[in-house]
Image (cartoon, rainbow, N blue to C red):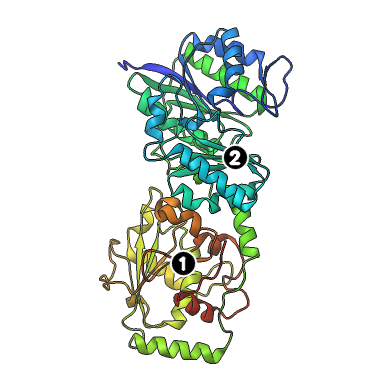
Amino acid sequence: MDKKRAACIFDLDGTLDHVECPAHPRIIRGRTTDAYISARALDILAEISMGIDIFIATGRSEATIGEFRRNFNGAGIRVAGWILEHGAVLPDRPEWTKTVWEGIDFNETWDALERLISDLGLTIDAVRYRPDRKGSILLSGKGALLAEYLIDAAAPILKGRFRTLAGKRKITLLPKKGEKWMAFAENYSATHRIAFAAGDDPDDLRLLCNADFPLTLAGASWLVQKLVKQRGGYLSSLPGHAGTEAMLGEILARLNGKEKRSAPLPGLRYPVEEAEDFRPSRREYLDLLFANAPPPNALDDPRWLRQMVEKLGQRLVQGRKMIIEVRMRDWGGEIKSLMPLLEILVPILPEARWRLLFRPERLGGENLKCFGAIGDKLFSFIGAKGHSGLSGFEGLEGRFSAPGVPGSPDDPGEASCSLWLYDHGDDMGHLYDRAIPRRIFRHPELAHTWFVNPMYLKISGAPLWGKIPRESKILAQLSGRRVMMA
């Protein structure tokens, strides 16, 4: 028998409260916009709290939950614990925030961001929320593109220690340990298990993933809706207050009946906010950067190109000694970005050998069980955009290897250069924010290493090299010239 107490965890904005005014409202006053909880939702929540411990997990700070406390107390709702600022603050356990900020000077980071915003002349308010925030950094600025520009410019300050949330009006910077599920697991899991969890945004995903029964409503993030469906949870067909009341009614019905549990899914890739296949604002920002990217400083001269190829061949004994290493996460969809890269480089260096290094993920491992399957894709792939594959080049089969994949040819040895096709911060580390807006980024710390943006190759639909012959551009890039600056 489970000795832990059952807990029910709720997000606030977009889950319990909404900006639309219901028929019988309870107001939540805000700095610029008021929100509302329906009287019916409070009544059901009060009944739920009589049979199970309720926790609130929100992005709000302690200074902005006063109206919620007042309404909850007035309705007789008992709250067992508050998780604030996306998991960075627990009011009853201040030592948790010290753990979250370990190794980070809070005031120094704030000051550096304020100086940066001032130096760049950005219309971002870095002062308003500072007194309220104890474990995170909240800035105010209109427009998602402005937020993305600041996030990229602030990379040397953030140093890969933060995850970022970019909204229409606010920019949130969170230490990596500041996360709702982690806050609950580290502070309450010894005494409680999550019987129910309800949320609507990606920062609720890990709570929903680890709850016995997850719930959400129409209008929630598509990732949240997908997860709840996968786990057999409850997805209300209604949005807003009606959807909230339906969710709460489902919890009450299960408490009064027989509580059922769902098996948790394997953990999501962290940080969960970046699991949206790039934030919409990040995609818009990248599209803008790519559209405005100037061509590289390379000579558009066939004679120069021939001379470069000849010199390169001479240095590499006609290219046979060159080993090009390509690193990527998994195999499934990476063919979409690998093929354009190979189609550029193979004609220039047909004698080089290639080593494909994969970092398998939970959903990509089945694609790496046999090297033959990789070879089939490499040499027969014909893409929607006219990729002809590599079938026209003889003798390439023996020049590719994938160490660790069954049936792979022998590892060719030490690489001459390394090309990274990574698209996630876990792989790029502190260079992620600097590298991701560029088409090609030369690694500032590792010699002969370049990051080639796979998301650009996959989603932009535009030629990687513009109108300048692509061969001259790739050779120029391998000579160390940068193609693009953010």
The foreground one among 400 and 148 is: 148
Q: Is 131 on the left-hand or right-hand side of 212?
A: right
**Kind of residue indicated by mark 1:** Leu
Position of the C terminus by quadrant: bottom right
Residue marked by disc 1: 338
Please say if 203 is above or below 362: above
Please say if 190 is above or below 276: above
The label on residue 284 is none
Q: What residue sits 38% from the left and 50% below the top?
A: 361
The answer, for residue 392, to whether it is visible in the render is no
> Where, by quadrant of the figure, is residue 95 drawn?
top left
Which percent across, then down, holds residue 343?
49, 75
Q: Is 187 on the left-hand or right-hand side of 204?
A: left
The foreground one among 87 and 368 is: 87
Which percent across, then down, holds residue 160?
43, 48
Q: Is 51 on the left-hand or right-hand side of 42?
A: left
Which percent across, then down, holds residue 291?
65, 64
Position of the N terminus by quadrant: top left
Which percent across, then down, holds residue 367?
38, 57
**Kind of residue indicated by mark 2:** Ala
Does dot 1 land on a helix, a strand or a loop? helix
Residue marked by disc 2: 126
Q: What residue sits 55% from the left and 78% below the top?
A: 470
Tell whether label 1 touches label 2 (CB within 8 Å): no
The foreground one among 219 and 95 is: 95
The answer, for residue 130, to whether it is visible in the render is yes
| Label whose residue precedes the other's in the sequence (2 or 1) | 2
Q: What residue sits 46% from the left and 72% below the top?
A: 380
Please say if 463 is above or below 204: below
User: How far is the residue under mark 2 from the one under mark 1?
Assistant: 41 Å
Does dot 2 land on a helix, a strand or a loop? loop
